[in-house]
Image (cartoon, rainbow, N blue to C red):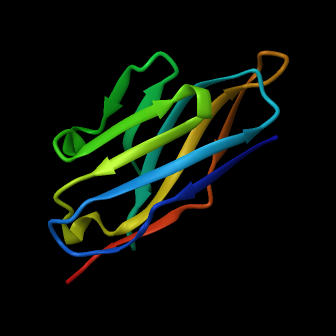
Amino acid sequence: QVQLVESGGGLVQPGGSLRLSCAASGVFFSINTMGWYRQAPGKQRELVAVVTDGGSTNYADSMKDRFTISMNNAKNTVYLQIDSLKPEDTAVYYCNAEVYGLGFELYDYWGQGTQVTVSS
């Protein structure tokens, strides 16, 4: 079993920045990918960005300019830097991890979500 613990959300003014963190813990062989998704009120959950254990990144087209994903492999932690925040970035941000179990089977895990609110 793997636990994902997110932190870094909160209330921020438009134009500000936030850095979200998500740490994976538990018993597993290795991490394949970690990523961030978000869900705004009344909308479906959408991809923000994903990073592989090798450092390759993939962003949703609309997220390429203000969002930066990175991963510290030694700490099993993924980060999401969000700059120039806009009110439309208000959402619950969820961490996701694809993890290889001890038998090399692939599992998918989600964090509990962290609220980001952009408002003046």
Q: Position of residue 117 (x, y in %)?
A: 34, 74
Residue 5 falls left or right of residue 2: left
Nearest the eye: 10 or 63: 10
Which residue in the rendered view is the most extreme toward the bottom? 120
Location of residue 115 (image quadrant): bottom left
Q: Residue at x 32, y 48 (%)?
A: 81
The part of the image, by quadrant, that contains residue 103 is: top right
**Residue 59 at x, y percent in the picture:** 30, 35
At horizontal 27% and vertical 63% (from top left) the residue drawn is 89
Q: Is residue 66 above or below residue 35?
A: below
Q: Position of residue 46 (x, y in %)?
A: 39, 50
Measured from the top left, where is residue 60 in percent x and y?
29, 39
Residue at point 50%, 64% (across, down)? 114
Query: If the image is split into quadrants, where does the N terminus sit?
Result: top right
Image side of residue 89 versus residue 101, left or right:
left
* Quadrant containing the C terminus in the rendered view: bottom left
What residue is at 21 percent from the left and 54 percent from the top? 83
Q: How many marks?
A: 0
Q: Is residue 73 above or below residue 61?
A: above
Kindly give the residue lying farthest to the front in the view shown. Answer: 74
Res 84 → quadrant? bottom left
Position of 50 relative to 52 (above/below): below
